Image (cartoon, grey):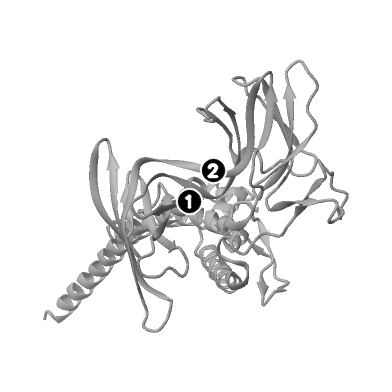
Amino acid sequence: MDDSTTSPAQTAKNCWWRRAYDVLSGFGLATVLLLLLGLLTWFATLEQVQLGLYPTLRKYFDWRSVVLLPELNGKMVPLPLPGGYYVSALLLLNMTLGGLVHIRKGWKQVGVMISHFGIIFMLLGGGVAHHFSERGNMAVGEGEISNTAEDYFEYVVEVAEVNEEGLTPKIHVIRGNYLTDLEGSARRVFNLPELPFDLEITGYFRNAAPVSANERAPDKKQPVVDGYWLLEKPDEINAEANTAACHVRILHRGAEPSAPFLLAGASFHPFTVRHEGRVFTVDMRKRLWPMPFDVRLDEFTAEFHPGTSRPEVFVSEVTRMENGGEAKVTIEMNAPMRYEGLTFFQASYGPPGAGPGDKMYSVFEVVHNPADKWPEWSLYVVAFGLTFHFLQKLAAHLGGGKRKSKP
């Protein structure tokens, strides 16, 4: 008589969640994911030459890029690839399950587990940097002081009242994350309780410019406002050169809405609103990012490769001023200033073609990245784990050799 009873162990082995767990924690999946990351990095490195750094990063490693088609020499490669963000997220899950949870626990596996933890820490650092880092630039002339950086990419809408002295004591800012989804007919009303009106924004473009309808007719039946319409443009190779634009209406409380008007990062002047003798400005510009301290550029020097205009090294001597105190700091290539969670890199300088005696200015890339040092720390952890594991193996090998040599 056949016994058809299935043991609990066999049931657990055959259930779907156990099989899924084995796949997610398996070495085979890790190998595939690492190969995919290598392939994505290779394609991204080649495509960066034509597309530019930030558009390439957005295409290959942004969380909004789920599936992509790589390009070589401007031609599409018919090879759908998963976005690097999700490949890395799946690798993080695989390393956690396989390298920490599923791995056999014991003294001999301590070094391997430490190394796996270091890799997991590195992947987590990449995720934190992707979602929470901020980047901008600060230009400071010699002898001048600045405490504000301009965001590289984020366009905001600013509303301010201009008083009799022409000053704007308070600026109301609508951040870019509330604007970028307002493409096409999507619209959103922004309540401004401290002002006598609200704003309605629609028709957002990441990169566009106002064009006169008298010079060029709309090519896709775009709405014409005061004789102008918004021409959408492809992303620039340097993404920071994009100029956002949108359509706006003033919603007066208890009155009819205003006629729509255009806001564009490419415009030189804000839109002016008059209400019962008060004057307001509405503008679109890159977000200004206040620093918790002042920076004064004391001196800028540059050295060039012999016979070329290519810089070999450029150095900024700055003074960091905070709460009445001062600190002298040198910022140069590959030697940034790190302070208060901010990193100041020496990015550029000007003016172009400056000669001896000309007043120079320095451009710093300002980065706020909560995971700034995580990759460095993770490498230390991985190195320690591998060294520990190697010494374990070496000690076991030498101990085994001694035992065999005994009579």
Q: Mark 2 points at which residue?
A: 287
Q: Position of residue 202 (x, y in %)?
A: 75, 38
* Element carrying mark 1: strand
* In the depicted structure, whether residue 207 falls above or below residue 357: above
Looking at the picture, does residue 327 appear above or below residue 379? above
Asked if disc 1 and disc 2 are in contact, CB closer than 8 Å, the reply is yes
The answer to which image quadrant residue 250 occupies is: top right
Q: Residues within 10 Å of mark 1 (few under 14, many from 20)?
A: many
Residue sticking out furthest to the top: 254
Q: Earlier in the sequence, mark 1 or mark 2?
A: 1
Res. 296 mark: none
Q: Position of residue 368 (x, y in %)?
A: 42, 47
The relative height of residue 125 versus residue 250 in the rendered view (above or below) is below
Q: Residue furthest bottom?
A: 307
- Residue at left offset 72%, top offset 40%: 182
Q: Which residue is drawn at 67% across and 59% down?
A: 235
On screen, residue 97 versus residue 67, left or right, reads left
Residue 104: tell me if it is visible: no
Residue depicted at 43% across the width and 77% down the height: 309
For this view, does 124 lie left or right of residue 195? left
Residue that carries the numbered disc 1 in the rendered image: 136
Q: What residue type is labelled 1?
A: Gly
Residue 217 shows up from this direction: yes
What is the number of callouts on the image? 2
Residue 258 location (% of width, % of height): 78, 28
Q: Residue at x 42, y 62 (%)?
A: 349
Q: Residue 385 location in percent, x, y?
A: 30, 61
Q: Tag 2's secondary structure? A: strand
